Amino acid sequence: LFASGSNDGTIKLWNGGDGALRGTLRAPGGLKAIALSNSVLVAIWDRWIDPNCGITLWSLDTPLRPIHTFYDIDRADPLKVSIAENSSLIAVCHFRHVTLFDVVNRTTIHTFDVPFYIHTMTFLPDNSHFVVQSDEGVFQSFDLINNHTTEGPTLERLVRLPNTSFFHGVPVWHCQDEEQHYFAAFFSQHQSLVPVLWIPKQISVTKWTQGSSMIALSCEDGRVILLRLPTSHVS
């Protein structure tokens, strides 16, 4: 299951297998960001008459139904949202500031700053850590149990992230050095990421996202390039 959205607040849910439309939702305002878990969809929206944004959650059960709305969210751009696999936590970032919400108790539980622009953010499946990544491949991990911050990637933790891609069994992440986009791998014998796949500069990449076996690149000319990664392990 995946979702698409438009500026008028329309959200469409699609089946990943056959691409069929599963349902349509309407946010209370223009969409800023959306995310999915196994059972919940979350959307950030705003209205020009309001100084702040809202976050609305819908259950993905049939029929689709709203669960709760958080109001008075900082409107500063850019906005991103992430939801834990078990739907109990939500993270919202605007520029370099992150706020965590407890979905069950419907409260704000933590806020923290990050020293770089956040490109992706993900919860570990057990909700013990929250990991953010910059455009340049810089990682920061937050221990949500002991309230501790770790700089840089750790292989044991990063391979558990739901959005980690694997190239011949080795975890890889998107990185960017000015206009050069590339993917780098984290090998256990190295202390830092190693470039393994370079994207030609004539391909003007504007946005990207990745899953365990595929990477999607959105280009300035309207093309969407899908990279299917080889899954066989290196010896």
Image (cartoon, grey):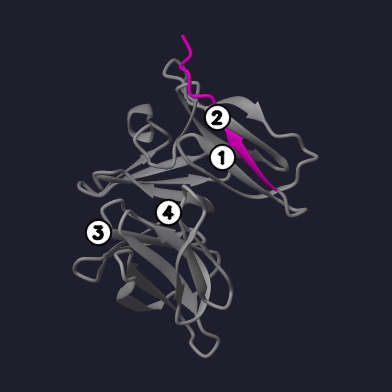
Q: Is 230 left or right of 88, judged from the image as shown?
A: right
Please identify the quarter of the rendering in which residue 216 is found.
top right
* Residue topped by disc 4: 1
Q: Counting other residues with Cα less than 10 Å from the Cα at mark 2, is it few (<14), some (14-19), or many (20 or more)?
A: some
Q: Name the mark nearer the viewer: 1 or 3.
A: 1
Closer to viewer: mark 1 or mark 4: 4
Q: What span is colored magenta in the figure?
A: 224-235
Q: CA distance from mark 4 to mark 2?
A: 20 Å
- Return the disc, 4 or 2, that comes first in the chain's sequence: 4
Residue at figure coordinates x 60%, y 26% from the top left? 195
Where is residue 194? Give x, y as percent.
56, 24
Q: Are marks 1 and 2 in contact (CB under 8 Å)?
A: yes
Q: Residue at x 32, y 74 (%)?
A: 65
**Numbered tag placed on residue 88 in the rendering:** 3
**Does the residue at mark 1 contact the one at mark 3 (Cβ under 8 Å)?**
no
In this view, the residue farthest toward the right is: 202
Marks 3 and 2, the one that precedes in the sequence: 3
Of marks 3 and 2, the one in the foreground: 2
Q: Is residue 157 magenta?
A: no
Specify which label sits upstream in the sequence, 1 or 2.
1
- Rounded to the nearest angstrom, the CA distance separating label 3 from label 2 is 31 Å
Tell me which label, 1 or 3, sits earlier in the chain: 3
N-terminal of the two: label 3 or label 4?
A: 4
Amino acid type for the residue under numbered disc 3 = Ser
Residue type, label 4: Leu
Asked whether the viewer can see residue 77, the reply is yes
**Is 211 positioned to the left or the right of 144 in the image?**
right
Considering only order in the chain, which callout, 4 or 1, is on the residue closer to the N terminus? 4
Residue type, mark 2 in image = Leu
- Looking at the figure, which quarter contains the N terminus? bottom left
Circle 2 residue: 229
